[in-house]
Image: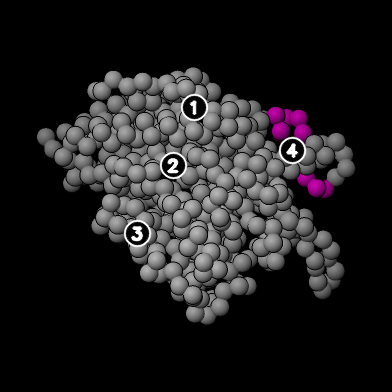
Protein backbone atom coordinates (compact mmCIF):
# COMPACT_ATOMS: atom_id res chain seq x y z
CA UNK A 1 0.00 0.00 0.00
CA UNK A 2 1.12 3.56 -0.72
CA UNK A 3 2.15 5.45 2.41
CA UNK A 4 -0.26 8.27 3.08
CA UNK A 5 -0.60 11.09 5.57
CA UNK A 6 -3.86 10.67 7.48
CA UNK A 7 -3.97 14.11 9.05
CA UNK A 8 -4.43 17.37 7.21
CA UNK A 9 -4.54 20.78 8.90
CA UNK A 10 -7.85 21.18 10.72
CA UNK A 11 -8.94 17.56 10.41
CA UNK A 12 -7.58 14.58 12.31
CA UNK A 13 -9.87 11.59 11.69
CA UNK A 14 -8.44 9.65 14.62
CA UNK A 15 -9.21 12.50 17.00
CA UNK A 16 -12.65 12.97 15.46
CA UNK A 17 -13.48 9.28 15.89
CA UNK A 18 -13.34 9.70 19.66
CA UNK A 19 -16.51 11.80 19.48
CA UNK A 20 -18.51 9.01 17.80
CA UNK A 21 -19.45 6.23 20.25
CA UNK A 22 -20.80 3.86 17.60
CA UNK A 23 -17.36 3.63 15.99
CA UNK A 24 -16.17 1.59 18.99
CA UNK A 25 -18.61 -1.20 18.13
CA UNK A 26 -17.56 -4.60 16.92
CA UNK A 27 -19.45 -6.32 14.12
CA UNK A 28 -18.89 -10.07 13.85
CA UNK A 29 -15.90 -9.71 16.20
CA UNK A 30 -14.33 -7.07 13.93
CA UNK A 31 -13.98 -3.35 14.53
CA UNK A 32 -16.74 -1.49 12.72
CA UNK A 33 -15.65 0.11 9.45
CA UNK A 34 -18.52 2.40 8.51
CA UNK A 35 -18.49 3.34 4.82
CA UNK A 36 -22.19 4.01 4.23
CA UNK A 37 -22.19 7.73 4.91
CA UNK A 38 -24.13 8.67 1.78
CA UNK A 39 -27.08 6.83 3.33
CA UNK A 40 -26.66 8.40 6.76
CA UNK A 41 -23.80 9.65 8.90
CA UNK A 42 -23.02 8.68 12.47
CA UNK A 43 -23.70 11.07 15.34
CA UNK A 44 -21.14 12.61 17.72
CA UNK A 45 -21.62 12.88 21.48
CA UNK A 46 -22.47 16.55 21.05
CA UNK A 47 -25.60 15.71 19.04
CA UNK A 48 -26.61 12.76 21.21
CA UNK A 49 -26.16 14.81 24.40
CA UNK A 50 -28.28 17.61 22.95
CA UNK A 51 -31.20 15.23 22.40
CA UNK A 52 -30.88 13.84 25.93
CA UNK A 53 -30.61 17.32 27.41
CA UNK A 54 -33.77 18.47 25.65
CA UNK A 55 -35.90 15.63 27.00
CA UNK A 56 -34.34 15.81 30.47
CA UNK A 57 -34.51 19.55 30.96
CA UNK A 58 -36.85 21.48 28.66
CA UNK A 59 -39.24 19.07 26.94
CA UNK A 60 -42.30 21.09 25.92
CA UNK A 61 -44.26 22.01 22.85
CA UNK A 62 -43.36 25.12 20.88
CA UNK A 63 -45.56 28.15 20.14
CA UNK A 64 -48.23 26.89 22.53
CA UNK A 65 -47.41 28.19 26.00
CA UNK A 66 -46.01 31.08 27.97
CA UNK A 67 -44.48 28.91 30.69
CA UNK A 68 -40.70 28.56 31.00
CA UNK A 69 -40.33 25.17 29.33
CA UNK A 70 -42.36 26.19 26.28
CA UNK A 71 -40.43 29.45 26.01
CA UNK A 72 -37.07 27.66 26.17
CA UNK A 73 -38.13 25.08 23.58
CA UNK A 74 -39.49 27.75 21.25
CA UNK A 75 -36.34 29.87 21.45
CA UNK A 76 -34.07 26.90 20.69
CA UNK A 77 -36.32 25.65 17.90
CA UNK A 78 -36.23 29.05 16.21
CA UNK A 79 -32.46 29.22 16.76
CA UNK A 80 -32.20 26.00 14.75
CA UNK A 81 -33.89 27.72 11.81
CA UNK A 82 -31.48 30.61 12.14
CA UNK A 83 -28.47 28.28 12.27
CA UNK A 84 -29.48 26.66 8.97
CA UNK A 85 -30.18 30.06 7.39
CA UNK A 86 -26.67 31.22 8.30
CA UNK A 87 -25.17 27.97 7.02
CA UNK A 88 -26.57 28.36 3.52
CA UNK A 89 -26.63 32.14 3.24
CA UNK A 90 -30.41 32.58 3.33
CA UNK A 91 -31.62 36.16 3.63
CA UNK A 92 -33.82 35.38 6.63
CA UNK A 93 -34.37 32.47 9.01
CA UNK A 94 -38.05 32.51 8.02
CA UNK A 95 -36.99 31.14 4.62
CA UNK A 96 -36.08 27.86 6.37
CA UNK A 97 -38.78 25.22 6.77
CA UNK A 98 -38.20 22.01 8.71
CA UNK A 99 -39.67 18.87 7.19
CA UNK A 100 -38.97 15.20 7.90
CA UNK A 101 -36.31 14.85 5.19
CA UNK A 102 -35.24 16.05 1.75
CA UNK A 103 -37.87 13.79 0.21
CA UNK A 104 -40.68 15.55 2.03
CA UNK A 105 -39.17 18.91 1.10
CA UNK A 106 -39.28 18.01 -2.60
CA UNK A 107 -42.85 16.77 -2.24
CA UNK A 108 -43.80 20.04 -0.57
CA UNK A 109 -42.43 22.03 -3.51
CA UNK A 110 -44.06 19.77 -6.10
CA UNK A 111 -47.48 19.90 -4.48
CA UNK A 112 -47.62 23.38 -2.93
CA UNK A 113 -45.97 25.16 -5.86
CA UNK A 114 -46.45 22.73 -8.72
CA UNK A 115 -50.19 22.13 -8.42
CA UNK A 116 -50.91 25.86 -8.40
CA UNK A 117 -48.43 27.03 -11.03
CA UNK A 118 -47.96 24.29 -13.63
CA UNK A 119 -50.32 24.00 -16.57
CA UNK A 120 -50.91 21.46 -19.34
CA UNK A 121 -48.00 21.42 -21.77
CA UNK A 122 -45.46 22.78 -19.31
CA UNK A 123 -42.18 20.90 -18.89
CA UNK A 124 -40.18 19.93 -15.82
CA UNK A 125 -36.51 19.29 -16.54
CA UNK A 126 -34.53 16.95 -14.29
CA UNK A 127 -31.53 14.69 -14.87
CA UNK A 128 -31.12 10.97 -15.34
CA UNK A 129 -28.95 10.88 -12.19
CA UNK A 130 -31.70 12.10 -9.86
CA UNK A 131 -32.65 10.33 -6.66
CA UNK A 132 -36.16 8.88 -6.84
CA UNK A 133 -37.34 11.63 -4.48
CA UNK A 134 -36.75 14.15 -7.27
CA UNK A 135 -38.50 12.01 -9.87
CA UNK A 136 -41.59 10.42 -8.37
CA UNK A 137 -43.25 13.63 -7.01
CA UNK A 138 -43.04 15.20 -10.48
CA UNK A 139 -44.52 12.04 -11.98
CA UNK A 140 -47.50 12.43 -9.66
CA UNK A 141 -47.89 16.10 -10.60
CA UNK A 142 -47.64 15.15 -14.28
CA UNK A 143 -50.64 12.83 -13.93
CA UNK A 144 -52.74 15.61 -12.43
CA UNK A 145 -51.59 18.56 -14.55
CA UNK A 146 -50.68 16.76 -17.80
CA UNK A 147 -47.18 18.20 -17.89
CA UNK A 148 -44.09 16.64 -19.45
CA UNK A 149 -41.01 15.44 -17.57
CA UNK A 150 -37.73 15.68 -19.51
CA UNK A 151 -34.40 14.15 -18.51
CA UNK A 152 -30.89 15.49 -19.05
CA UNK A 153 -28.50 12.66 -19.90
CA UNK A 154 -25.01 11.99 -18.56
CA UNK A 155 -22.02 11.43 -20.82
CA UNK A 156 -20.00 8.23 -20.95
CA UNK A 157 -17.66 9.49 -18.21
CA UNK A 158 -20.59 9.99 -15.83
CA UNK A 159 -20.83 13.78 -15.89
CA UNK A 160 -23.99 15.73 -16.65
CA UNK A 161 -24.26 16.32 -20.40
CA UNK A 162 -24.47 20.11 -20.66
CA UNK A 163 -25.05 19.93 -24.41
CA UNK A 164 -28.13 17.84 -23.72
CA UNK A 165 -29.22 20.42 -21.16
CA UNK A 166 -29.01 23.12 -23.81
CA UNK A 167 -31.10 21.01 -26.20
CA UNK A 168 -33.87 20.36 -23.69
CA UNK A 169 -34.08 23.73 -21.96
CA UNK A 170 -36.72 25.76 -23.81
CA UNK A 171 -39.65 28.18 -23.48
CA UNK A 172 -41.90 25.42 -22.13
CA UNK A 173 -39.53 24.65 -19.26
CA UNK A 174 -41.14 25.88 -16.02
CA UNK A 175 -39.02 23.95 -13.52
CA UNK A 176 -35.44 22.71 -13.49
CA UNK A 177 -34.80 20.49 -10.47
CA UNK A 178 -31.32 18.99 -10.15
CA UNK A 179 -29.20 17.04 -7.72
CA UNK A 180 -26.07 18.93 -6.69
CA UNK A 181 -23.94 15.83 -6.09
CA UNK A 182 -24.84 12.36 -7.32
CA UNK A 183 -25.40 9.77 -4.61
CA UNK A 184 -24.19 7.09 -7.07
CA UNK A 185 -21.44 8.66 -9.18
CA UNK A 186 -20.31 11.25 -6.65
CA UNK A 187 -19.98 13.92 -9.36
CA UNK A 188 -20.74 17.52 -8.44
CA UNK A 189 -22.87 19.24 -11.06
CA UNK A 190 -21.87 22.77 -12.21
CA UNK A 191 -24.99 24.44 -10.84
CA UNK A 192 -23.60 27.98 -10.98
CA UNK A 193 -23.32 27.69 -14.75
CA UNK A 194 -26.64 25.87 -15.07
CA UNK A 195 -28.45 28.46 -12.95
CA UNK A 196 -27.63 31.24 -15.39
CA UNK A 197 -29.08 29.23 -18.26
CA UNK A 198 -32.22 28.36 -16.29
CA UNK A 199 -32.89 32.00 -15.41
CA UNK A 200 -32.63 33.03 -19.06
CA UNK A 201 -35.82 31.03 -19.59
CA UNK A 202 -37.47 32.27 -16.40
CA UNK A 203 -37.79 28.76 -14.97
CA UNK A 204 -37.89 27.83 -11.30
CA UNK A 205 -34.56 26.38 -10.15
CA UNK A 206 -34.57 23.71 -7.42
CA UNK A 207 -31.42 22.19 -5.93
CA UNK A 208 -31.28 18.82 -4.17
CA UNK A 209 -28.28 19.36 -1.89
CA UNK A 210 -28.71 16.22 0.22
CA UNK A 211 -25.37 14.80 -0.97
CA UNK A 212 -23.44 18.06 -1.22
CA UNK A 213 -24.22 20.06 1.90
CA UNK A 214 -22.39 17.63 4.24
CA UNK A 215 -19.16 18.04 2.27
CA UNK A 216 -18.81 21.61 1.04
CA UNK A 217 -19.84 25.19 1.65
CA UNK A 218 -23.26 25.97 0.23
CA UNK A 219 -24.51 29.46 -0.59
CA UNK A 220 -27.99 29.70 -2.08
CA UNK A 221 -27.18 33.11 -3.55
CA UNK A 222 -24.15 31.83 -5.44
CA UNK A 223 -26.12 28.78 -6.59
CA UNK A 224 -28.90 31.07 -7.79
CA UNK A 225 -31.61 28.66 -6.69
CA UNK A 226 -35.22 29.38 -5.75
CA UNK A 227 -35.47 26.32 -3.51
CA UNK A 228 -32.92 24.04 -1.89
CA UNK A 229 -33.51 20.80 0.02
CA UNK A 230 -31.33 18.66 2.28
CA UNK A 231 -31.43 16.27 5.24
CA UNK A 232 -29.82 16.70 8.66
CA UNK A 233 -28.98 13.02 9.09
CA UNK A 234 -26.47 13.09 6.24
CA UNK A 235 -24.43 15.78 8.02
CA UNK A 236 -24.06 14.36 11.56
CA UNK A 237 -27.54 15.50 12.59
CA UNK A 238 -30.50 13.43 13.77
CA UNK A 239 -32.89 11.60 11.51
CA UNK A 240 -36.33 13.09 10.96
CA UNK A 241 -35.20 16.63 10.13
CA UNK A 242 -35.27 17.88 6.55
CA UNK A 243 -34.36 21.31 5.26
CA UNK A 244 -36.38 23.30 2.79
CA UNK A 245 -35.05 26.69 1.82
CA UNK A 246 -37.31 28.83 -0.30
CA UNK A 247 -37.27 32.46 -1.35
CA UNK A 248 -39.72 34.30 0.88
CA UNK A 249 -41.73 35.75 -2.02
CA UNK A 250 -42.38 32.24 -3.32
CA UNK A 251 -43.22 30.77 0.09
CA UNK A 252 -45.65 33.61 0.78
CA UNK A 253 -47.55 32.86 -2.42
CA UNK A 254 -47.70 29.08 -1.99
CA UNK A 255 -50.52 27.14 -0.39
CA UNK A 256 -49.69 25.00 2.67
CA UNK A 257 -48.68 21.39 2.21
CA UNK A 258 -50.26 20.06 5.41
CA UNK A 259 -53.16 21.49 7.39
CA UNK A 260 -53.94 21.59 11.11
CA UNK A 261 -52.43 23.02 14.25
CA UNK A 262 -49.91 25.88 14.37
CA UNK A 263 -50.01 26.51 10.62
CA UNK A 264 -53.13 28.65 10.96
CA UNK A 265 -53.78 32.25 11.87
CA UNK A 266 -57.56 32.07 12.27
CA UNK A 267 -60.13 29.27 11.99
CA UNK A 268 -63.89 29.69 11.64
CA UNK A 269 -66.52 27.11 10.86
CA UNK A 270 -66.18 27.52 7.13
CA UNK A 271 -62.72 28.94 6.45
CA UNK A 272 -59.21 29.50 7.75
CA UNK A 273 -56.28 31.80 7.22
CA UNK A 274 -52.64 30.82 7.38
CA UNK A 275 -49.82 31.59 9.76
CA UNK A 276 -46.69 33.49 8.68
CA UNK A 277 -43.74 31.61 7.17
CA UNK A 278 -42.17 29.24 8.05
CA UNK A 279 -44.94 28.07 10.40
CA UNK A 280 -47.44 27.98 7.53
CA UNK A 281 -45.59 24.89 6.32
CA UNK A 282 -44.89 23.26 9.72
CA UNK A 283 -48.27 21.86 10.70
CA UNK A 284 -48.71 20.13 14.06
CA UNK A 285 -46.08 19.40 16.67
CA UNK A 286 -42.71 19.44 14.92
CA UNK A 287 -39.64 17.31 15.61
CA UNK A 288 -38.42 19.74 18.24
CA UNK A 289 -35.66 17.73 19.92
CA UNK A 290 -33.97 16.73 16.69
CA UNK A 291 -34.22 20.22 15.22
CA UNK A 292 -32.45 21.59 18.28
CA UNK A 293 -29.84 18.79 18.08
CA UNK A 294 -29.15 19.85 14.50
CA UNK A 295 -27.45 22.97 15.91
CA UNK A 296 -24.43 21.13 17.43
CA UNK A 297 -24.14 19.03 14.26
CA UNK A 298 -23.71 22.17 12.17
CA UNK A 299 -21.37 23.65 14.77
CA UNK A 300 -19.25 20.49 14.65
CA UNK A 301 -18.79 20.70 10.89
CA UNK A 302 -18.16 24.43 10.91
CA UNK A 303 -15.56 24.06 13.64
CA UNK A 304 -13.67 21.64 11.40
CA UNK A 305 -14.15 23.76 8.29
CA UNK A 306 -15.76 22.59 5.06
CA UNK A 307 -12.57 23.27 3.11
CA UNK A 308 -10.77 20.69 5.25
CA UNK A 309 -13.67 18.27 4.96
CA UNK A 310 -13.50 18.54 1.17
CA UNK A 311 -9.73 17.96 1.13
CA UNK A 312 -10.00 14.95 3.43
CA UNK A 313 -12.65 13.31 1.26
CA UNK A 314 -10.71 14.04 -1.92
CA UNK A 315 -7.73 12.24 -0.43
CA UNK A 316 -9.78 9.23 0.63
CA UNK A 317 -11.54 8.99 -2.72
CA UNK A 318 -8.34 9.23 -4.75
CA UNK A 319 -6.69 6.62 -2.54
CA UNK A 320 -9.62 4.21 -2.93
CA UNK A 321 -9.86 4.70 -6.69
CA UNK A 322 -6.12 4.16 -7.14
CA UNK A 323 -6.28 0.90 -5.17
CA UNK A 324 -9.39 -0.52 -6.83
CA UNK A 325 -8.17 0.42 -10.31
CA UNK A 326 -5.41 -2.18 -9.93
CA UNK A 327 -7.91 -5.03 -10.23
CA UNK A 328 -9.37 -5.96 -13.61
CA UNK A 329 -12.25 -7.74 -11.86
CA UNK A 330 -13.57 -4.47 -10.44
CA UNK A 331 -15.67 -2.12 -12.53
CA UNK A 332 -15.65 1.48 -11.30
CA UNK A 333 -18.54 3.86 -12.06
CA UNK A 334 -17.34 6.94 -10.20
CA UNK A 335 -15.17 9.08 -12.54
CA UNK A 336 -11.44 9.17 -11.82
CA UNK A 337 -11.29 12.94 -12.22
CA UNK A 338 -13.38 16.08 -11.83
CA UNK A 339 -15.17 17.60 -8.85
CA UNK A 340 -16.65 14.82 -6.71
CA UNK A 341 -17.76 14.09 -3.18
CA UNK A 342 -16.56 11.00 -1.30
CA UNK A 343 -18.80 8.48 -3.05
CA UNK A 344 -17.33 5.46 -4.86
CA UNK A 345 -19.61 3.08 -6.77
CA UNK A 346 -18.32 -0.14 -8.28
CA UNK A 347 -19.03 -3.83 -8.88
CA UNK A 348 -17.10 -7.06 -8.78
CA UNK A 349 -17.36 -8.62 -12.22
CA UNK A 350 -19.79 -11.55 -12.20
CA UNK A 351 -20.70 -11.26 -8.50
CA UNK A 352 -24.00 -9.87 -7.20
CA UNK A 353 -23.43 -6.74 -5.09
CA UNK A 354 -25.59 -8.09 -2.26
CA UNK A 355 -23.31 -11.11 -1.96
CA UNK A 356 -20.25 -8.88 -1.80
CA UNK A 357 -21.83 -6.59 0.79
CA UNK A 358 -22.72 -9.61 2.90
CA UNK A 359 -19.14 -10.85 2.85
CA UNK A 360 -17.84 -7.39 3.79
CA UNK A 361 -20.28 -7.29 6.68
CA UNK A 362 -18.67 -10.49 7.99
CA UNK A 363 -15.47 -8.41 8.19
CA UNK A 364 -17.30 -5.62 10.05
CA UNK A 365 -17.36 -3.37 6.97
CA UNK A 366 -20.58 -1.50 6.18
CA UNK A 367 -21.06 -0.48 2.56
CA UNK A 368 -24.26 -0.15 0.54
CA UNK A 369 -25.49 -2.40 -2.24
CA UNK A 370 -28.55 -1.88 -4.42
CA UNK A 371 -29.94 0.61 -6.89
CA UNK A 372 -29.46 3.51 -4.43
CA UNK A 373 -32.88 4.98 -5.25
CA UNK A 374 -31.56 5.86 -8.71
CA UNK A 375 -32.99 3.23 -11.05
CA UNK A 376 -33.06 5.46 -14.17
CA UNK A 377 -29.32 6.04 -13.71
CA UNK A 378 -28.74 2.33 -13.13
CA UNK A 379 -30.43 1.62 -16.46
CA UNK A 380 -28.29 4.29 -18.14
CA UNK A 381 -25.18 2.56 -16.74
CA UNK A 382 -26.56 -0.78 -17.98
CA UNK A 383 -26.62 -2.35 -14.51
CA UNK A 384 -29.29 -3.23 -11.98
CA UNK A 385 -27.30 -2.73 -8.80
CA UNK A 386 -23.96 -1.45 -7.58
CA UNK A 387 -21.78 -1.42 -4.49
CA UNK A 388 -21.19 1.97 -2.90
CA UNK A 389 -18.56 3.00 -0.38
CA UNK A 390 -19.00 6.55 0.88
CA UNK A 391 -16.56 8.41 3.08
CA UNK A 392 -16.76 11.10 5.74
CA UNK A 393 -14.73 12.99 8.32
CA UNK A 394 -14.02 10.00 10.60
CA UNK A 395 -12.92 7.59 7.88
CA UNK A 396 -9.25 6.69 7.37
CA UNK A 397 -6.96 5.26 4.71
CA UNK A 398 -6.52 2.22 6.93
CA UNK A 399 -10.25 1.51 6.66
CA UNK A 400 -10.00 1.64 2.88
CA UNK A 401 -7.15 -0.86 3.07
CA UNK A 402 -9.41 -3.14 5.13
CA UNK A 403 -12.19 -2.80 2.57
CA UNK A 404 -9.82 -3.69 -0.28
CA UNK A 405 -8.59 -6.80 1.56
CA UNK A 406 -12.18 -7.87 2.16
CA UNK A 407 -13.01 -7.34 -1.52
CA UNK A 408 -10.05 -9.50 -2.50
CA UNK A 409 -11.38 -12.18 -0.16
CA UNK A 410 -14.85 -11.92 -1.73
CA UNK A 411 -13.34 -12.23 -5.21
CA UNK A 412 -11.40 -15.33 -4.21
CA UNK A 413 -14.54 -17.00 -2.87
CA UNK A 414 -16.33 -16.63 -6.21
CA UNK A 415 -13.25 -17.27 -8.32
CA UNK A 416 -11.42 -20.17 -6.57
At 37% from the left and 69% from the top, the residue drawn is 167
Q: Which residue is mark 3?
A: 161
Q: Nearer the viewer, residue 33 or 321?
A: 321
- Label 3: how many residues lie within 10 Å, few (<14), some (14-19) or many (20+)? some
Picture coordinates of residue 146, whole percent (x, y) = 50, 78
Pointer 4 or 3: first along the chain: 4
Using the image, tell me which numbered label, if any, was put on residue 22. 1
Residue 365 relative to residue 193: left or right: left
**Distance of mark 1 from mark 2, alpha carbons?**
17 Å
**Distance of mark 3 from mark 2, alpha carbons?**
23 Å
- Point out the stretch of residues depicted in magenta: 53-64
State which mark lies toward you, 4 or 3: 3
Q: Which residue is mark 4?
A: 76
At 50% from the left and 60% from the top, the residue drawn is 196
At 45% from the left and 72% from the top, the residue drawn is 170
Q: What kind of element bears circle 2?
A: loop
Amino acid sequence: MTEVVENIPGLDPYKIRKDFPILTRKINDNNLVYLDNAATTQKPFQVIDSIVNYYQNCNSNVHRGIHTLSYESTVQYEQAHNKVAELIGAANWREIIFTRNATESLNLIAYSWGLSNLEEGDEVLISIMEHHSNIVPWQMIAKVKNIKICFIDVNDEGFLDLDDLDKKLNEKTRVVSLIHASNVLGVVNPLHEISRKVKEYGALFIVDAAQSIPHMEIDVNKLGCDFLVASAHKMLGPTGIGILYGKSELLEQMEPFLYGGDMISTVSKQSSTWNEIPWKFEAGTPNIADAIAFIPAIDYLQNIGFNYITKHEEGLLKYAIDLLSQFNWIKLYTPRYGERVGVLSFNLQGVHPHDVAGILDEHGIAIRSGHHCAQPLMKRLDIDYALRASFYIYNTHKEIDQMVEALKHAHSLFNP
